Amino acid sequence: MKLEPTPEQLRSFYRMSVRMSNLLRPINLVRMDERTKRIVMLVGDTIEIEIYPNGEVVTK
């Protein structure tokens, strides 16, 4: 079974990628968690971003 992001996740991912790039932050890792179906981004040394299937973004 192929796991693909939802349209809402893609929109949020694009928005967060542009935002982090504008802040000159390196995006070190992007992956989709197969268990939770969330996109996880590691940005810089300290920022962790999770994008839920409904497009909601949580920054830690």
Image (cartoon, rainbow, N blue to C red):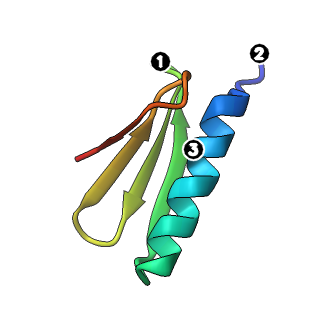
Percent position (x, y) of residue 24?
43, 84
Task: Judge left or right: residue 31 versus residue 11.
Answer: left
Image depth: mark 3 or mark 1 in front = 3
Secondary structure of the residue carrying tag 1 is loop
Residue 13 higher or lower than 42, as above or below: above
Quadrant of the rendered image containing residue 9: top right
Crowding around mark 1 (Cα neighbors within 10 Å: few <14, some 14 to 19, many 20+) is few
Q: Which mark is residue 12?
A: 3
**Residue receiving disc 2:** 1
Taking the spot 57% from the left edge, 67% from the top edge, the residue there is: 18
Assign the N terminus to one quadrant of the image: top right
**Which corner quadrant of the image does residue 20 belong to?**
bottom left
Q: Which circle's residue, 3 or 2, is located before the other in the chain?
A: 2
**Residue, disc 1:** 35
Whether 44 is drawn above or below 1: the answer is: below
Q: Is residue 37 above or below residue 16?
A: above
Q: CA distance from mark 3 to mark 1?
A: 20 Å
Q: Amino acid at mark 1?
A: Arg
Label 3 neighbourhood size at 10 Å, few (<14), some (14-19), many (20+)? many
Q: Where's residue 45, x and y in %?
A: 25, 70
Callout 2 environment at 10 Å: few (<14), some (14 to 19), or many (20+)? few
- Above or below, 31 against 42 in this view is above
- 3 vs 2, front mark: 3
Amino acid of disc 3? Ser
Which element is circle 3 on? helix
Residue 5 visible = no
Disc 1 from disc 2: Cα separation: 13 Å
Q: In what element is the residue under mark 2?
A: loop
Q: Residue at x 22, y 47 (%)?
A: 60
